[in-house]
Amino acid sequence: MNRRTVVTMLATLLALPAFAVAQDKELSTTQTIHIKASPDEVWAYAGDFGGIARWFTATAASRLVLRSKNEEGAIRELLRGNGTKVREKLVEYDPGRMTMTYTYVDGQVLAKDYFATMEVKASGNGESDVVWTGRFKLLDDRPEGQDEAALVALYAGIYQRGLAMLKAKVETEE
């Protein structure tokens, strides 16, 4: 082996960890909406892990497939409007703080290492703010054209539309 080949091989080997780290970069989005209803009224919808289809119309159906109530470890199966299915696991549920965190279990997932948190907060005057945050990474075998910006925009859009649906549902129920 000549010197040039050795240098090229070493440079390639040294670059691999940096490439791997870049591919596994954690991405996130946080979306918030103000709802003219009390936190308890909002949480009755947002905190119903198995009942997301009651307000998030992009979900054609949802049901708990493990456990029968909102508790850590519960798994819900979602049938999306486009016909795909995904299962999500409730990893943290705190009705006192009106917060829950869930992750993908299986199905047609959109990202890896996905964790989403929804929190309802009092904003004064009997009204609420809902914060929906997602942390995730690009899939190893992702769709063509999906890069970091596209994945963040996808989840930001899902959360914005979902929060708008939640707001419409809760405010018309009053």
Image (spheres, rainbow, N blue to C red):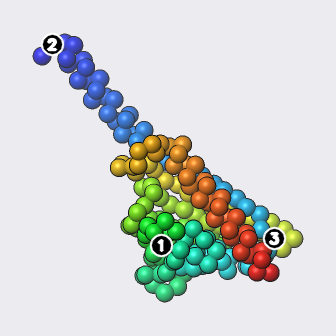
Spatial separation of the CA atoms under disc 2 and disc 1: 58 Å
Mark 1, residue position = 79
Mark 2, residue position = 2
Of mark 1 and mark 3, the one earlier in the sequence is 3
- Expressed as whole percent of the image width and height from the top left, the position of residue 23 reads 40, 42
Quarter of the image with the C terminus is bottom right
Instruction: Tell which of 18 and 58 is nearer to you.
Output: 58
User: Label 3 amino acid?
Assistant: Lys
Spatial separation of the CA atoms under disc 1 and disc 3: 29 Å
Instruction: Tell which of 53 and 1 is nearer to you.
Output: 53
* Corner quadrant of residue 157: bottom right
Element type at marker 1?
strand
Quarter of the image with the N terminus is top left
Mark 3, residue position = 36
Instruction: Tell which of 114 and 156 is nearer to you.
Output: 156
User: Label 1 amino acid?
Assistant: Leu
Spatial separation of the CA atoms under disc 2 and disc 3: 72 Å
Of mark 2 and mark 3, the one earlier in the sequence is 2
**In this picture, residue 94 sits left or right of residue 84:** right
Going by the picture, which residue comes out furthest to the left? 1
